[in-house]
Structures are given as C-alpha cells and as structure tokens.
Image (tube, rainbow, N blue to C red):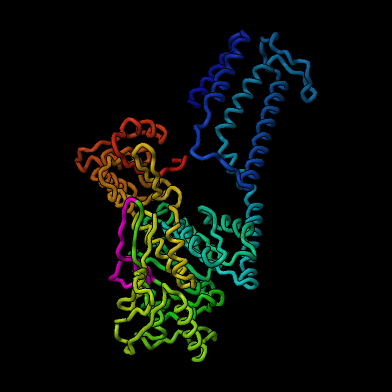
Amino acid sequence: RTIFFSFLLIIMILLTTFLNSPVIYFLTLSPFLILCFRSRPKRAKKPLVYTKRAKRLKVLYLIIFLFLCSSGIFLIGYLFAKYDLESSFESFNFLRYLKFYDYYFSKSFATSILVSTLYCVILIYITPCIMCLSLALISPYEKRINRRFYKSAADKIERLKKSNGLKVIGITGSYGKTSTKNFLASILNEAYPTFASFESYNTPMGLSKVINENIDETVSVFIAEMGARYRGDILELMELCKPDITILTAIGPAHLETFGCVENITAEKWDIVLPYKSEKLNPSFCFINSDNEYIYTQFKKYLDEKKIYDARKYYPLYYQSYENMFQLKKADKPIVFTYGINASRSPFFLCQSLNPGENGTDFTVKILDLLQWKNYSNDKEIDLNKELNGNTLNDEQNDHHCNASNNNTNNNDDDSYSNTNNDKDNDNYNNTNNDKDNDSYSIKNNYIEYKFSTCLLGKHNVVNLLGSIGCAYILGVPVEKIKKAVSKIEPVAHRLQLIRTSFDTLIIDDAYNANPDSSAAALEVVSYFEGRKKIIVTPGFIELGKLQYDANFNFGKEISKIFDIAIFVGIANKDALISGFESAKSSNKYFYFDTLDDAMKILPSIQTGPCLILFENDLTDNY
C-alpha cells in the first residue's frame, strides 16, 4: 500500500508539470495524506515503554531526521529559485514575495512543494538507515555509560559481600530459571532477607539496573537470573554478580539461531558452574538438574576430569549449619549437588511419589542423610577439608560442628532423628521422634524423606521446586519453614497458571514461553483433567533454527492425539503445525487464524459443556 501511494504521488507530480490547474496540486498531496492517516501500526500486545537509552537514541534519530528533512526542503527550494524553472501557475504562487536566501520565489514554488513532499516520502523509506546511523553515532557514548553502570553494580556487589556478607545465587538454564528463581526467593524469605531480580531481568544491563537501584545493606541474599543468547554472556554475568551459589535448571534447544547447536548451549550454560578460564569466579557450590541428559553427561565428564567435587562424596558438614550460612568457605573446585526424579542417577535430592491432580501436586523429597555420611567417602583419595585453600577445619572444630548440627537437628521436632546402629555400612535407621503419629518424614536407605504439597501443576514445576528446596536446605532453612513456603507458592504468571472461570471452563495459561520440553510437560498436565472438552491455542515454537519445522510438526501431531480442537495462530509455524496435526489422521478439528485476537473470537462458539483451554506460548509482536 505504501509503495502504491508513493508511485501515485510521483505520477501526480508529473501531471502538474503539464496541466495548468491548481486543483492538481491538492490532488497530488492526497496520496501522502492518505498514507499518513491509514498506515497506522496495529495495536501491540504490550505498550511500548522507552528506556533511557531508547529515549536518547530516539532524540538523536529525530534530530538527524529533521536535519535531513529541513535541509533537503531548503535545498530544493533554493534550486528551484536559483534556476527559475518555468511554470504557468502564477495565481498559485502566493508566497512569491517571501525572501529565500536573497532570491525571490519563482513561479515554480508550488512544484518545489510537491518535490519536497516526494523527498519526505523517500526519507520515510530510508528511516531504518537513519536509525542505523543514529545507533552508530551514539554507540560509543552508550558503551561508556554501560561500562560505568556495569562497574558501579559490580563494585556494589563486591562491597556488600565484604561489609555485609551478602550472598549471591545465580540461576541459569534454557528454561525453568524464572520459576526456580521465584520459588527459591519465596522459600529463602522465610529465613533471610532475600531479593530476586525482577521478572526476566537477566542481561548485564538488566541485572546492573537491579543491583544499582534495589540491592542495599538490608538484603542478605540476592538471587540473579542469568540469561544467554550468545557465547560469553554467562561469563559476563558471573563477573558482574560473582555468585557464591549457582543453579543450572535445564539445557535444551533454545536460541539455536544464535548458538547454532545444543553443544554450544551446553558449554555456555555450564559456565555458571565452571566459568571458562576464570577459576576465581568458581562458585562455592552448585545445584544441577541430573534428570537433564545434557547436564548429566557434562557432569560425569567433569567428574572424570576431576574439575568438580561430587557433593554425595565430599560434602563438608559445616556448609549445612544454619549459623554458618554467612561463613561459607570456598573449596578449590565447585561442590556440585544433584537433584531430580530419576532414582537411577542417585541424586543428592531425590523427588518421588508424585501425586499430581487438578488442585496441585503432592510429592516426597528424599535427602541424603548428612549426619550419617559426615566426612566419610567411598573414595579416600581426596579429603575435602585439606583442599580448602588453607581454610580447613581441625578435628576439634569439626567435632564441635557435628555436635552443633546434631543439637540443631534435635531441636526441630520434624527433623529430629538419630542413628542407633554403630555399623556405618548398615542402611537401617531408627526414627526417635517423640511424635509417633507424625509421618512428615522418615529415614530409609541413607535418605531422609519429607512430604510436601504444592498447588503447582506439572512434573517440571516440581523439579524446579526441588532445586529450590535443595538450595534452601543446604543454606540451613529449617524444613518446616521450607514446607510452609512450598505450600504457599503460587504459579508464576503465564507459566502453567490454572485459572478457574464461572462457566465450568478451566484455563491453563502457559503463554509466557514454550519449547519442546516445556510443552510436553504442559500436555502431560492436560492429561490430569478428565471429562472435559480440551482446546489448545498455540503459535508453536520459535528460535529453534533448523529444528523448528520438525519440532512444530511433532508438536502438531501430539496435539491431534490429545485435544478435541486445536487453534493455530500466526504464520510463523502454520505449515508445520497443520501438517503435523493432519498426519495423525485424527477426527479432531483445527482452526487457523492470523492473530490471537481473531482466535479469541471463536472460543465462545466452540465451548460446549465442561472445557479445558490451554494457551501454549504467545509470540511477540515481531512475529
């Protein structure tokens, strides 16, 4: 449409050269006016919010645009006046008495106006080039501001670590990091003043803003979400936050357009455990999801190369003490705790007995019995206490800590237990809790078992919660407080959020983001709900590079097996989703719409009886 009006404008300008009617001048301007009023951008899903940097860039862009516009019009008028191009429109030359660089306007003034209009249209076409020019000009200034802002945040973290004992927890992963961050913040707030980075503020500048504006002496624990789109992003965030504890939630095919392959993603995400060529940034200990194949494979590789310590063998007791959370001592290598639901991998924190339902999930967490293990190891070659860079505990201090840990444990009715067998190789333990009716925990086969309940849906949410529980447990938060916090945790907005309506319709809002793994978990959650008509609204997955078509094809195929009606939105994955859906040769139906607004209009007409509607992913405006 823009091109059509521009060509029409050029034709009208040519007509004015040969026709002797002033009306033609007004007709010539009409395409430009129509273009201005009709070419309005469509309503965005989220209103545009300008950052300070964006405002500076916009101001520079406007200055350059206005300079080019005014100088171009000035030059056009000057040339028409100088060469006095002949025109017979004497009656329309109403500004001929105005001076213009000591020239009087010629009869061609009106024609110069039309040429100036065409020049402005051309400027509109090259606005991307003008924006690139503005960005190039302002880039050195912005880099100086960013460096100063980044350094201010890094210095503040360093200062608070020394003066107030601030502890920083860094969380990354292809997915699950925002949920884990929010879960962990809710739990740690039961024991320590904790602050978590906002929403998805996970870039160097985003975290610098949070640190500079929100972290102060009143904060004991800062939880930083760390995102990555390019190789080296995690290392930059590690240098900024210098986390004492890190959590690696999951690795999968995400941002493949920038990383290229999952192997590059794995290397990047593992920088949060072993920063590349930066041993001074090594965290004290890390928590990793051992269920994830990419993570577990790398974990075994680093164990074989003796680059990390396995907490199941070398975990020193003094890390567990509630009183010593602010005196964490750093080993020469990160101590890695594993968590997950795959019992065959014997994670330090094992989740079992999952009982999912429409109202949430009940589950059991099994934690290695630290008091039984003490400093015993199946591998006697390494004594971690001798590897603490001089910060070792002598036997007297270690015995004192063990006694303190026993006393601290026995003071908690829910946690109290004792080992009544002198044979360290015997796995049978007796529960000496005075409350015989309390079944909130038990001890079996070197594990302590605790029962939890949460309103969260989905196995992957429970796994994210397990990582948070493990981190809080090691930091000394009493189990009763952990259980209390877990029971109160609400789903993160737009992440498998269950919404009950008054029309016997349930909505599962999982629209924030989607990838093949998280969507598989969402489809599993849908299977919990029986006796309802199932409807899905989805645009599919993006940023999967060469894997995108196949991933969406398989997604469409799975959808056809579970949902009665599928509504596909947007052109990005239209062909793959529909082809996958049709390949299953199911009797279920599907619809396609260009926008989510159009898709929403059909929902009332297809809701009959009890329904379940899953919103899986919602693409941004640029898609």
Name the residue at 51% across, 91% down: 396
Q: Can you say whether 220 is above or below 311 in the image?
A: above
- Report the residue at 45% width, 68% height from top: 480
Asked if 413 appears above or below 148 in the picture, the reply is below
Residue under the point 45% across and 57% down:
488
* One can see residue 300 in this view: no
> In the image, which residues are magenta?
338-358
- Of residues 416 and 474, which is closer to you in this image? 416
Left or right: where does residue 356 sit relative to residue 228? left
Q: In the image, residue 343 lies at what x, y percent?
A: 29, 69
User: Is 357 displayed left or right of 307 in the figure?
Assistant: left
Please state, as top left, top right, bottom left or bottom right, where the C terminus lies in the image: top left
Rendering quarter of residue 168? bottom right
- Residue at 48% of width from left, 88% of height from top? 399
Give the answer, above or below, for where 112 lies relative to 440. Answer: above
Query: Which quadrant holds residue 456?
Result: bottom left
108 or 488, nearer to the observer? 488
Residue 153 among those drawn in magenta: no
Q: Quadrant of residue 562?
A: top left
Residue 354 within the magenta-colored segment of the rendering:
yes
Viewer-proximal residue among 164 and 173: 164
